[in-house]
Image (cartoon, rainbow, N blue to C red):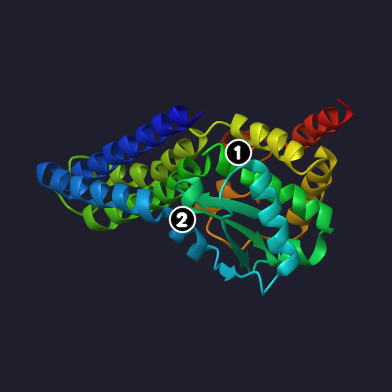
Amino acid sequence: MRWLNNLKTAALLGGMMGLCLLIGWAVGGATGLLLGLLFGGIGNIVSFYYSDKIAIAAMRGQEVTPEDAPELYRMLERLSDRAGIPTPRLYVCPQEAPNAFATGRSPEHAAVAVSSGMLNSFPLPEVEGVIAHELAHIKHRDVLISTVASVLAGIISYAGYMAFYLGGSRRDNPLGPIGMLLMVMLAPLAAAVIQMAISRQREYAADSYGGELCGDPRKLAYALRRLDSGNRRVPTDTPPAFHNLYIAQPLSGQGLASLFSTHPPIEDRIARLEAQARG
């Protein structure tokens, strides 16, 4: 599992560099390639070492101490000890939409964040199921590739728009105005494809281990149903590039949009957890 995620991370970083070089070439030809190389190199370094801090900042998370939320922190410590990993940092994000995510490049540099909407409206056993799911991601080292993909998606989308504004009107750019417009349209699609490079199977695996970790898979199953209902009612005011980090995708894709969903269908996940509980 660890070597496979390391391979996926390397592939994402390589893809990031390739796309930055392409955008640089579109903006300024040979000179733009050098700019793309610089932009991609900096983006890779930032996303690898600082992606967790970027994700927490994007969600406006505030760190929680054992004194701030003793019961929640004890739950996190107990589950972390059961999973055999260091207790991650704990954050609360101010969003009313219920959700949670984990981030960090390794179990030693990890954090779990939950929204205030979830803490204020979910029964404690269901919160336990959600935290167990996030700890499963940390234990399986899923969080690095997920967070890196989120940061890269944002960088690529931004780079596409910058390429249009900087190079769209230049007579000597290799693609021309129409080509630049197409690049702006395709950059977010490329970002979505990068996020889809993270297999949905990691969510199933985290559900399964999380259900085992919290002692009853139904805790997580009930939480997922409540998350699905809550996210349909309350809009999520966070950058879309980071939505793949959440335990439940805020925007539920229907029809063609579901092809670009980074999460499996909630009902399928619930059915698997209920079968696990019966087993």
Q: Position of residue 200 (x, y in %)?
A: 60, 32
Image quarter of residue 118: bottom right
Residue 202 location (% of width, % of height)? 60, 33
The label on residue 261 is: 1
Label 2 crowd bin: few (<14), some (14–19), many (20+), radius 10 Å:
many
- Label ID, residue 52: 2
**Distance from Cα at disc 2 to Cα at disc 1:** 22 Å
Binning the other alpha carbons within 10 Å of mark 1 as few (below 14), some (14 to 19) or many (20 upward) gives many
Point out residue 121 in the picture as x, y percentages from the top left corner. Answer: 81, 63
Tell me what residue is drawn at x 30 percent, y 43 percent. Answer: 178
Q: Of label 2 and label 1, which has the lower sequence position? A: 2
Amino acid under label 2? Asp
Drawn side of residue 113 relative to residue 160, left or right: right
> What secondary structure is found at the residue carrying circle 2?
helix
Looking at the image, which residue sits at the far top?
279
Q: Residue at x 39, y 47 (%)?
A: 152
Hey, what amino acid is under mark 1? Ser
Q: Nearer the viewer, residue 192 or 104?
A: 104
Left or right position of 91 against 181: right
Q: Residue 177 — which label?
A: none
Point 78% across, 67% down: residue: 120
User: In the displayed image of the protein, which residue is found farthest to the left?
Assistant: 31
